[in-house]
Image (cartoon, rainbow, N blue to C red):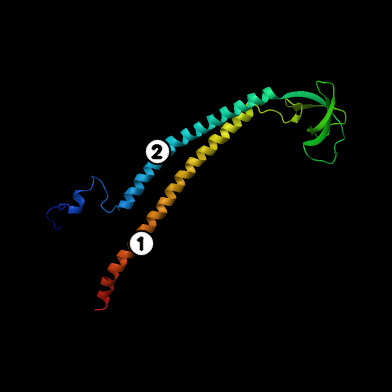
Amino acid sequence: MTAQGPPCTPGPPSPRDEHLPKGANPLSRPSDRFEAWLRRVLLVVLVLGLPLAAYGAGTTVYASSMKAVRVQTAERHEITARLAEDLDPDNDATKQLARVRWTDEGGDVRTGNALVKAGTDKGAAVRVWLDRAGNLTTPPMNSLNAKASGWLAGGMAAFGVAFGCYAVRSGTRLLLDRGRYARWDAEWDRVEPLWSARFRR
């Protein structure tokens, strides 16, 4: 035989529960609600801001690099020079800085230092780059360099957005936890004497 009583019916809501949104946790603190709201905002920033920042930075740097490619290509030209010295056979580097000799447009013989492939024999023909003044310079940038710069800038921008969101979330969480612990300590200081008094009776 089982005892059956009237079905349990929920009591009337407390005054504190009446002004809470439907489905809200009555134990949720304002700091908890703020933290949940901040997580949603940071998620939106990651989903929308990260690709936009990466695309914007990448395309801007790529366009600037391509402009530099066009300028350098117009200002520099390649000529054939001759290696004017013997290279160190014991050097393991892929390229070595060596003296080269070439004849300029006026017929004058000029010399300068340029990077030459290791193992090149003295007197061998080497290709070097000159600027408008006829001085040795580095090769101009190419489109591959511009693309690499664009991808690098886009990746750094994406990492910056992700790291910024992580830093904001971690910093806010740290500040909120400090406030929570401080409130818990204050409440315990107020309640603990009432609990300890029960055991002193």
Q: Quadrant of residue 1?
A: bottom left
- The mark found on residue 44 in the picture is 2
**Above/below status of 37 relative to 50:** below
Q: Nearer the viewer, residue 14 or 9?
A: 14
- Residue 147 visible at all: yes
- Residue 14 visible at all: no
Which amino acid type is shown beneath numbered disc 2?
A: Val
Q: Nearer the viewer, residue 196 or 118?
A: 118
- The mark found on residue 73 in the picture is none
Tell me the mark number nearer the camera, choosing from 1 and 2: 1
For label 2, the SS is helix
Which amino acid type is shown beneath numbered disc 1?
A: Ala
User: What percent of the width, then of the height, locates residue 56?
Assistant: 50, 31
Query: Which quadrant, please, contains the C terminus?
Result: bottom left
For label 1, the SS is helix
Q: Nearer the viewer, residue 99 or 15?
A: 99
Q: Residues within 10 Å of mark 1 (few under 14, many from 20)?
A: few
- In the shown orientation, is residue 139 left or right of residue 84? left
Which residue matches tag 1? Answer: 182
Q: Quadrant of residue 45?
A: top left
**Above/below status of 125 relative to 93:** above
